[in-house]
Image (spheres, helix red, strand yellow):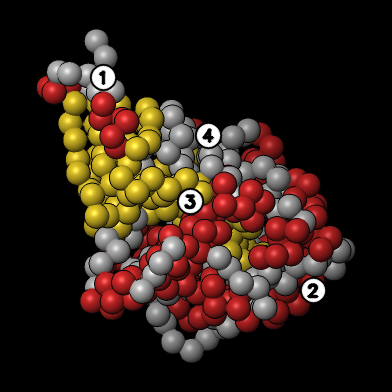
Amino acid sequence: MTSPLHIVRGELIHFIADPAEAGASALVHVVDGALVIADGHMVECGPAAAVLAKLPTTPSTTRITDYRGKLILPGFVDTHTHYAQTDIIASHGEQLLAWLEKYTFPAERRFADPDHAAAVAAFFCDQLLRNGTTTALAFATVHPASVDALFAAAQQRRMRMIAGKVLMDRNCPDYLADTAASGYAESKALIEKWHGRDRLLYAITPRFAATSTAEQMTLAGQLFAEHPGVYLQSHVAENQAEVAWIAELYPQARSYLDVYERYGQLGARSVYAHCIWLDDTDRARMAATGAAMSFCPTSNLFLGSGLFDLDRAHDLGVRVGIGTDVGAGTSFSMLQTLNEAYKVLQLRGQSLSAERAFYLATLGGARSLYLDHRIGNFAPGKEADFVVIDPHATALMTRRMAGARTLAERLFVLMMLGDDRCIAHTHILGEAA
Ligand code: GUN
Ligand code: ZN
């Protein structure tokens, strides 16, 4: 018995390489294209006429979904976000350290209540989907049950989710502190419970070096070494006051990033949010170890943290993905996040092309998470997560699109003017979510 086929027809856009390296050949564009999906995975993609001509003649085994007039892209990959900060998005007036004290810690305290965690997790996952995001790397809170809630919500929606319990045993309110020993034991139990279950993967989650003792940092590195395939996520070099504080807390380290390296926390599948106040030695260490940077432009502008240097990261060969960083970030929309990435890079004198922006939001994100064998484009065998975009979702977009001649121009209009209103459908493993 062969599996039934699902054909999805529309204008296909995906990447097979990084446009910053491969140029125009990185992007595949099929104006009237079709995806062939079986058992939630890609079988092939190509021009609709060729795909349809090859179909089995028994229509009962083939279903066609017609999205002509819409763009079909791989599902977006959000490489850094905090589900527990959903309710404090858009909180006024502070930079990082005061923002954590004033808004973030009190909001995260509420996740001691599993019912609250479940309600926020459901809302968060639904927001990801309505924005076309099908894979995310997310912080939970210090409470192990907050991880259970997020994984349960993602599992129910069949999403790819990487998440973990925050490790935090100093410089935080008592009500949010774990200990080096409890953090280790609870993380280990969560890894055993969730890592590799359906599409879920675990990330060891030391909040940042300021909120972990040396003992907890050691144990986080040890957990990472003990569990090949598991992720590690943290924050680094986001804000200048934070960087100065880290230098006081860890006087022996060469740099903020070096703290993580000393504790065995740099390597493949480690993902660091922000990476603004790094030097080239740090960037070279990230490249050499296989660590990834998550560029979080809306957050960096909102908290006044600084301007990420994409060209330097690229020149030194570091993996880079895009992160919304909700709730310091101000949008769940990867389109709006690309909009602000463009503006951050303008302030750096760097011109982000639309092709590169959409690469970073799809295949680039997948590569930074070492998931490009499973997601990120429409290559055969990959999981069929994709987003269906209406380029005429608003009157303004329709008007501006009329003057866009090239695909690059259309993609640029999409990332500058688009948001959840133009996400017509999000498909997970082939099916509309
Ligand atoms: N650094 C440590 N914790 C956080 C957090 O929750 N958000 C951001 N943006 N930076 C952090
Ligand atoms: Zn963050």
Residue contact at pointers 1 and 2, CB within 8 angstroms: no
The answer to whether residue 356 is left or right of residue 158 is right
Query: What residue type is disc 3 on?
Result: Thr
Which residue is located at x 30 percent, y 64 percent? 391
Q: Residues within 10 Å of mark 3 (few under 14, many from 20)?
A: many
Mark 3 or mark 1, which is nearer the start of the sequence? Answer: 1
Question: From the image, which quarter does the N terminus lie in?
Answer: top left
Residue contact at pointers 2 and 3, CB within 8 angstroms: no
Picture layout, residue 19 above or below residue 239: above
Query: What residue type is disc 4 on?
Result: His
Query: Which element is circle 3 on?
Result: helix
The image shows residue 112 at horizontal and vertical percentages of 38, 59
Q: How crowded is mark 4: few (under 14 residues within 10 Å), some or many (20 or more)?
A: some
Q: Mark 3 points at which residue?
A: 362
Mark 4 or mark 3, which is nearer the start of the sequence? Answer: 3
The image shows residue 405 at horizontal and vertical percentages of 41, 67
The answer to whether residue 78 is left or right of residue 153 is right
The image shows residue 184 at horizontal and vertical percentages of 59, 45
Q: Name the residue under label 4.
A: 373
Residue with the most extreme top position? 1
The image shows residue 418 at horizontal and vertical percentages of 35, 69
Query: What residue type is disc 2 on?
Result: Glu
Q: Name the residue under label 1.
A: 3
Q: Which of marks 4 and 2 is in front?
A: 4
Q: Distance between the residues labelled 4 and 1?
A: 22 Å
Mark 1 or mark 4, which is nearer the start of the sequence? Answer: 1
Mark 3 or mark 2, which is nearer the start of the sequence? Answer: 2
Q: Residues within 10 Å of mark 1 (few under 14, many from 20)?
A: few
Asked if residue 186 can be seen in this view, the reply is no
Mark 2 or mark 4, which is nearer the start of the sequence? Answer: 2
Q: Nearer the viewer, mark 2 or mark 3?
A: 3
Which residue is located at x 78 percent, y 47 percent? 288
